[in-house]
């Protein structure tokens, strides 16, 4: 071993110079070879093995993660049209687009650029609570992200949706709005919007959750008692529940403090079995919704033994003014969810505030102004969506086609219909939010071959609305109205009714020199298709007759000097039995259709399914935030205030019902405890 080592050392020393030269030549040749083969190796990596090696850069489609690793590498390897992109499955394509949005990379750009040079374009269709909430969350007034460009489209001339105020009285001198809209105690997120205080800061330390400069006490009234009337006169008084001396468990509080003047205690006791249904029904639970959605609320009350008088004088008026349709035509799930949120969630749930003026002027105008000035949001009013274009390689919406009423300054192709002139334009879109109601969703899908190709969206054809008639009359003298807000029943079969003392709510009962001015009363009718055919004069005459019955001589001696009539055919969402399965979720992939929708299309509004548990304006506002959060790559409920937790006795009741179902289910179905019968199974 030693001799051989010495000999080898001698050989190496003799050939040191020649070996060094050969090594340099060989190293140079290898370097040239590697450089020449590198493009081929990269191409084979992209073409031959995108899954699993290349797709390891992406989260699994089943993963809850939304953060891509190496986003720039993903952008360069998987832009649409590349070999790697074409070999990805549709499932991985959807994952790619949803995760890459977190990094704000333009996949349709062949150059390696980030949104430092190109902003993500979000188109929002609908400027009601849902659309404005989404725009607010996406705009710079809410976040520190300057890489999103928001455009809001609405067919009306003013924003606000059903809460809009772009109406005038018959003689054209006074403004009106589409009904009165209350702000109930559980409107936590809307209350935060209306209060731009120091404690109203988002995660960036900015007061972006609120409308700049707005004070909730300047916008909304205080709490007040409410009345309930029938043709017989005053039937009930809803007090300010938070002012009662003793705080009671929910349910007991409403029974003890609500003053029913003509409904006997025996009739009210027959409503107790509804507590069983409320204990089983959890409005945040999809299974509970499906279980109770197939039956009507009236049928549920009949099966549980609620007396006819209790149903007609307590529950039917609540359903007609809360869900805008008779209980026989409303889903039991919707009725239970609505009544729990507005009335039974806690003792104070039914306490309500009203706007001190028209909502459009007091809330929407400053809100829109702040988003335009501080958030860079563009609003296109008097603009209708006419279609959607899709990118065949990505399966995503690439642009939204729309038609605007021409003001002479718009760009795009022009057309005319009669005396109206229109401008057609196409808006580029990276993400789209449809923030419209049931009627509009139905219409959009029926008129869009692009959306109609997808099963989850075709189901919107089953959605429909119910009609509202909103009126406002101006009297020649001031009359006394006991309660500023009132619900009514019994004036027209199957029609709900409310009326409000607008002068008292808006603080306009006197002039600047303290002279009394004539009363202004708002009267709104729900499920009102039978009334819409009347002409304006006939409607105003009916309104005055109904108020004369309710308010008596003081109203009968007054005269109408002006009036506003707003007809809203099929405009309010109708939660009819069986409708829940046809409603959208915030994203199509959660819509029960196997995820076979469009990955960059989102939904917002009070017709959207959500586990938040809210209703009406608050629900629309929350789903707008949820859609915006998903677009920004956040958790869906990021920054959203939850509905207060159930009270302890409600939690205990729901636990008992759940355990009982599991025990019964285990006995009937062996190990499958989830199949235990519900109250609905026993009743039907």
Image (cartoon, helix red, strand yellow):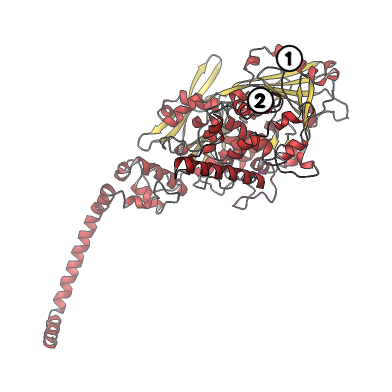
Along the viewing direction, whichever of 414 and 240 lies nearer the viewer? 240
Disc 2 is placed on an element classified as helix
Along the viewing direction, whichever of 216 and 258 lies nearer the viewer? 258
Is residue 538 visible in the rendered image? The answer is yes
Asked whether 579 falls inside the magenta stretch, the response is no
Contact, mark 1 vs mark 2 (Cβ under 8 Å): no
Asked whether 202 falls inside the magenta stretch, the response is yes
| Placement of the C terminus among the 4 image quadrants | top right
Indicate which disc residue 491 carries.
none
Indicate which disc residue 542 carries.
1
Q: In the displayed structure, does residue 497 sit left or right of residue 161?
A: right
Q: In the displayed structure, does residue 666 sit left or right of residue 199?
A: left
Q: Position of residue 403 (x, y in %)?
A: 51, 25
The magenta segment is: 192-210
Indicate which disc residue 320 carries.
2
Picture quadrant where residue 292 is located = top right
Q: Position of residue 107 (x, y in %)?
A: 39, 44
Along the viewing direction, whichever of 37 and 655 lies nearer the viewer? 655
Q: In the displayed structure, does residue 305 sit left or right of residue 548?
A: left
Decide: is 552 above or below 336: above
Task: Give the dominant element type of the magenta stretch: helix, strand or loop.
Answer: loop
Near mark 1 (Cα within 10 A), the count class, few <14, some 14-19 or many ≥20, is some
């Amino acid at each position: 071993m030693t001799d051989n080592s010495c000999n080898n050392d001698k050989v190496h020393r003799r050939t040191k110079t020649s070996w060094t030269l050969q090594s340099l030549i060989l190293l140079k040749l290898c370097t040239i070879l590697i450089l020449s083969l590198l493009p081929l190796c990269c191409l084979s990596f992209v073409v031959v093995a995108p899954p699993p090696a290349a797709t390891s850069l992406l989260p699994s489609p089943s993963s809850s993660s939304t953060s891509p690793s190496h986003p720039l590498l993903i952008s360069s390897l998987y832009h649409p049209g590349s070999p790697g992109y074409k070999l990805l499955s549709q499932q991985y394509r959807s994952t790619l687009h949803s995760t890459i949005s977190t990094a704000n990379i333009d996949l349709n750009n062949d150059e390696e650029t980030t949104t430092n040079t190109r902003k993500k374009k979000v188109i929002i269709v609908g400027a009601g609570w849902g659309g404005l909430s989404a725009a607010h969350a996406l705009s710079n007034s809410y976040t520190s992200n300057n890489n999103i460009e928001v455009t809001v489209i609405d067919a009306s001339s003013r924003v606000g949706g059903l809460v809009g105020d772009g109406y005038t009285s018959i003689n054209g001198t006074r403004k009106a709005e589409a009904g009165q809209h209350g702000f109930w105690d559980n409107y936590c997120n809307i209350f935060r919007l209306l209060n731009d205080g120091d404690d109203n800061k988002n995660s960036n330390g900015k007061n972006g959750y609120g409308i700049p400069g707005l004070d909730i006490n300047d916008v909304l009234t205080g709490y007040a008692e409410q009345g309930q009337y029938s043709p017989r006169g005053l039937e009930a008084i809803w007090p300010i529940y938070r002012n009662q001396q003793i705080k009671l468990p929910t349910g007991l509080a409403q029974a003890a403090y609500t003053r029913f003047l003509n409904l006997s205690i025996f009739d009210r006791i027959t409503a107790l079995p509804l507590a069983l249904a409320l204990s089983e029904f959890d409005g945040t639970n999809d299974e509970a919704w499906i279980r109770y959605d197939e039956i009507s609320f009236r049928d549920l009350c009949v099966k549980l033994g609620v007396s006819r008088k209790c149903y007609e004088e307590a529950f039917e008026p609540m359903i007609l003014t809360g869900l805008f349709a008779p209980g026989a035509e409303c889903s039991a799930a919707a009725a239970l969810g609505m009544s729990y949120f507005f009335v039974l969630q806690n003792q104070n749930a039914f306490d309500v505030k009203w706007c001190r003026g028209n909502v459009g002027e007091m809330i929407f105008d400053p809100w829109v102004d702040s988003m335009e000035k501080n958030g860079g949001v563009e609003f296109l009013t008097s603009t209708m969506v006419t279609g959607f274009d899709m990118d065949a390689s990505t399966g995503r919406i690439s642009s939204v086609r729309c038609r605007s009423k021409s003001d002479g300054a718009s760009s795009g192709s022009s057309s005319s219909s009669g005396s109206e002139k229109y401008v057609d334009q196409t808006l580029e879109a990276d993400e789209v939010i449809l923030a419209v109601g049931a009627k509009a969703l139905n219409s959009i899908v029926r008129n869009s071959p692009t959306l109609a190709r997808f099963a989850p969206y075709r189901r919107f054809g089953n959605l429909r609305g119910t009609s509202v008639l909103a009126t406002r009359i101006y009297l020649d003298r001031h009359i006394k109205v006991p309660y500023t807000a009132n619900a009514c029943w019994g004036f027209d079969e199957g029609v709900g009714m409310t009326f409000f003392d607008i002068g008292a709510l808006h603080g306009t009962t006197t002039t600047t020199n303290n002279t009394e001015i004539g009363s202004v009363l708002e009267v709104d009718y729900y499920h009102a298709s039978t009334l819409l055919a009347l002409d304006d004069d006939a409607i105003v005459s009916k309104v005055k007759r109904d108020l004369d019955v309710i308010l008596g001589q003081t109203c009968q001696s007054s005269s109408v000097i002006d009036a506003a009539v707003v007809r809203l055919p099929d405009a309010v969402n109708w939660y009819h039995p069986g409708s829940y399965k046809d409603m959208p979720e915030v994203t199509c992939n959660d819509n029960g259709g196997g995820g076979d929708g469009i990955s960059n299309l989102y939904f917002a509004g009070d017709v959207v399914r959500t586990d938040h548990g809210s209703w009406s304006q608050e629900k629309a506002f929350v789903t707008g935030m949820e859609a915006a959060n998903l677009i920004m790559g956040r958790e869906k409920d990021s920054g959203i205030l939850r509905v207060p937790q159930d009270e302890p006795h409600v939690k205990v009741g729901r636990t008992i019902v759940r355990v009982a179902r599991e025990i019964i289910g285990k006995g009937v179905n062996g190990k499958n405890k989830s199949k235990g019968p519900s109250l609905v199974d026993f009743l039907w």
